[in-house]
């Protein structure tokens, strides 16, 4: 397919803007959809993490409230302050620790260390054990200004105590450590540690994310993982560039950012002894799944639309360009010389109108060529007849001059006059290459012909003419008047009469046209033949065979082998289509032939 063809340009210029518009619409729609989904997801998950923050805070506060029993239980606090040695005191301590352990189903074990007696008590699986004379466990001994500390997730242990203790299956737990102070001072009376199973966080955090598609982390202030999607990472430090760059150095309580093909939303959880951060990761592929599905559907529809548009555009382009190609083939046939190519209609659109105009133009050209060809053929026929009638014009002309000289020597002037008239006619007809002559020359030729006819018919007719002086030097086609005059002697002359006449007049119709009238008082043309002749004069564009046909009927109607239709054809060829020739019978008897042509003032205009 060539670029410079209308078909290619039509297809490209329709498909290209359509494709650009559709792609731009899809891009804008996709961008808007992703932005809308991102904004909606951020808003929804920010609210969700905030709610998770409240729930985790409530959990920590509940554990913290349980740890404060040591202050609300006066007996427990007094025994811890004074020391306890007897069985009743130990039972009272065990009872308080058991209350703490049984208050929440997710508490794994409770550890208490009394500073005064250097006693350590561990309540595991509702079974208390006590050790005396040992130092406190290092993680439980709080020396900071805050009496409460939340330890990140770690594997449960026996706080450094040895057997005999109940066997405990190690599991991930986080621990609340509290320093029990002598009020109102900060002097430590003891240290309380409560291990909490991660199931307490699982019930809260599992509702904050989609476990199949999203990730979530609960991080402490040092970046260690308290809870997350991967249990193997519990207690380990999170090594991620996005955390160090976007969260660790940021002091805002909540926010979001997009990195590594994911959207991260974080919420800080800050309370007494606690500085955790809840982080949720949403992959963009999951976040924009609806937009991607819509984009996939749009791409499918785009491909289908493009196929449809391409098909329709191709069909339309072929519908438009096929007539042009067919018209080009017609023109190529005309160029090779085939002027008779049959041009079929091609519809009513613009191409169809052009094709119709081309067909009309070819019809006009063919008619013009046919008319000129007929006229040329007629002229060749006339020349052939003239050659057949003139064996050797120059020889005959010279011979006539010799005979005329002899007639003068023998004193027979009448014969000399006739020979001179015949010689004039022969000289006039010898210059066949001249298509036009002056009106005076044409009249002189008729005069020479009349002189011969007067001798033939013993002066039984008279000849007269009346022409305006200004018309004698104008031009007209050659051999027009003589064939018309000849018709009178062939078919209209009555030998029984001696008052016959033939008259030629020439008058100016207007400034540009003249009328030549040839009339006689001979025999009239029969009505049927006159109608036939008029019909031939009204429709001169006959076939070449009809033009040259010399039947008896044509001879009787025209009086000449050449005929009035031939005279009219030569008039139209030389003087234009406005030339007219009419014939009619006169009421008083006889025939009148009228010629009306444009006045030709100069020979060069022909």
Image (tube, helix red, strand yellow):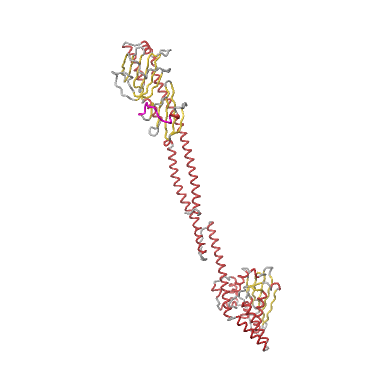
Picture residue at 48% right of the left edge, 40% below the top: 29
Q: Position of residue 545 (x, y in %)?
A: 54, 74
Relative placement, left or right, of 47 versus 421 is left
Q: Outermost residue toward the bottom?
A: 410
> Which span is picked out in magenta?
232-243
Image height of 102 relative to 502, above or below: above
Q: Outermost residue toward the right?
A: 469
* Residue 144 figure quarter: top left
Name the foreground residue: 370 vs 565: 370
Q: Quadrant of the C terminus?
A: bottom right
* Residue 66 figure quarter: top left
Q: Position of residue 350 (x, y in %)?
A: 54, 56
Name the foreground residue: 398 vs 29: 398
Image height of 123 relative to 261, above or below: above
Relative placement, left or right, of 552 versus 446 is left
Q: Position of residue 337 (x, y in %)?
A: 52, 66
* Residue 106 figure quarter: top left
**Is residue 242 highlighted in magenta?**
yes
Image height of 28 relative to 504, above or below: above
Q: Can residue 523 be spotted in the picture?
A: no
Q: Can residue 233 be spotted in the picture?
A: yes
Q: Outermost residue toward the left?
A: 164
Q: Position of residue 277 (x, y in %)?
A: 42, 26
**Is residue 297 highlighted in magenta?**
no
């Amino acid at each position: 397919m060539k670029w410079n063809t209308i078909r290619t340009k039509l297809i490209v210029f329709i498909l290209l803007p359509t494709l650009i518009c559709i792609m731009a619409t899809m891009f804008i729609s996709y961008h808007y959809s992703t932005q809308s989904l991102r904004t909606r997801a951020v808003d929804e998950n920010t609210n969700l993490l905030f709610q998770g923050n409240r729930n985790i805070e409530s959990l920590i506060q509940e554990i913290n409230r349980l740890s404060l029993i040591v202050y609300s239980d006066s007996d427990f606090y007094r025994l811890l302050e004074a020391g306890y040695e007897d069985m009743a005191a130990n039972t009272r301590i065990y009872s308080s620790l058991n209350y703490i352990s049984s208050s929440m189903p997710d508490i794994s074990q409770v550890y208490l260390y009394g500073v005064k007696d250097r006693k350590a008590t561990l309540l595991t699986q509702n079974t208390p054990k006590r050790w005396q004379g040992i130092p406190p466990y290092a993680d439980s001994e709080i020396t900071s200004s805050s009496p409460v500390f939340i330890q990140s997730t770690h594997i449960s242990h026996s706080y450094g105590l040895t057997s005999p203790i109940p066997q405990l299956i190690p599991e991930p737990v986080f621990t609340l450590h509290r320093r029990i102070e002598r009020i109102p001072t900060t002097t430590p009376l003891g240290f309380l540690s409560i291990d909490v199973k991660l199931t307490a966080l699982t019930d809260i955090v599992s509702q904050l994310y989609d476990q199949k598609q999203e990730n979530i982390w609960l991080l402490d202030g040092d970046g260690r993982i308290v809870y997350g999607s991967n249990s193997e990472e519990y207690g380990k430090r999170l090594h991620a560039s996005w955390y160090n760059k976007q969260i660790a150095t940021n002091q805002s309580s909540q926010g979001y950012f997009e990195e590594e093909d994911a959207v991260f939303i974080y919420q800080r959880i800050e309370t007494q002894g606690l500085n955790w951060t809840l982080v949720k990761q949403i992959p963009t592929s999951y976040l924009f799944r609806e937009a991607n599905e819509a984009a996939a559907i749009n791409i499918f529809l785009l491909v289908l639309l493009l196929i449809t548009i391409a098909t329709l555009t191709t069909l339309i382009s072929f519908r438009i360009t096929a007539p042009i190609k067919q018209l080009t083939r017609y023109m190529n046939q005309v160029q090779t010389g085939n002027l008779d190519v049959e041009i079929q209609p091609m519809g009513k659109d613009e191409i169809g109108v052009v094709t119709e105009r081309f067909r009309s133009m070819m019809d006009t050209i063919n008619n013009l060529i046919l008319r000129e060809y007929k006229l040329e053929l007629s002229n060749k026929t006339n020349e052939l007849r003239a050659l057949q009638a003139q064996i050797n014009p120059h020889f005959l002309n010279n011979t006539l001059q010799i005979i005329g000289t002899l007639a003068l020597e023998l004193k027979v002037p009448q014969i000399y006059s006739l020979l001179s008239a015949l010689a004039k006619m022969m000289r006039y007809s010898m210059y066949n290459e001249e298509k036009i002559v002056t009106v005076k020359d044409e009249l002189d030729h008729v005069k020479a012909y009349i002189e011969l006819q007067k001798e033939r018919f013993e002066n039984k007719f008279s000849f007269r003419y009346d022409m305006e002086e200004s018309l004698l030097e104008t031009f007209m086609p050659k051999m027009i008047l003589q064939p018309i005059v000849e018709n009178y002697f062939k078919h209209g002359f009555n030998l029984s009469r001696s008052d016959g006449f033939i008259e030629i007049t020439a008058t100016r119709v207007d400034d540009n046209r003249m009328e030549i009238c040839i009339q006689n008082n001979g025999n009239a043309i029969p009505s049927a033949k006159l109608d036939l002749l008029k019909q031939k004069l009204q429709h001169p564009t006959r076939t070449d065979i009809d033009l040259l046909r010399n039947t008896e009927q044509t001879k009787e109607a025209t009086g000449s082998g050449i005929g009035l239709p031939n005279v009219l054809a030569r008039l139209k060829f030389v003087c234009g289509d406005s030339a007219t020739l009419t014939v009619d019978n006169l009421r008083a008897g006889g025939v009148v032939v009228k010629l009306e042509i444009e006045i030709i003032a100069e020979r060069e205009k022909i």
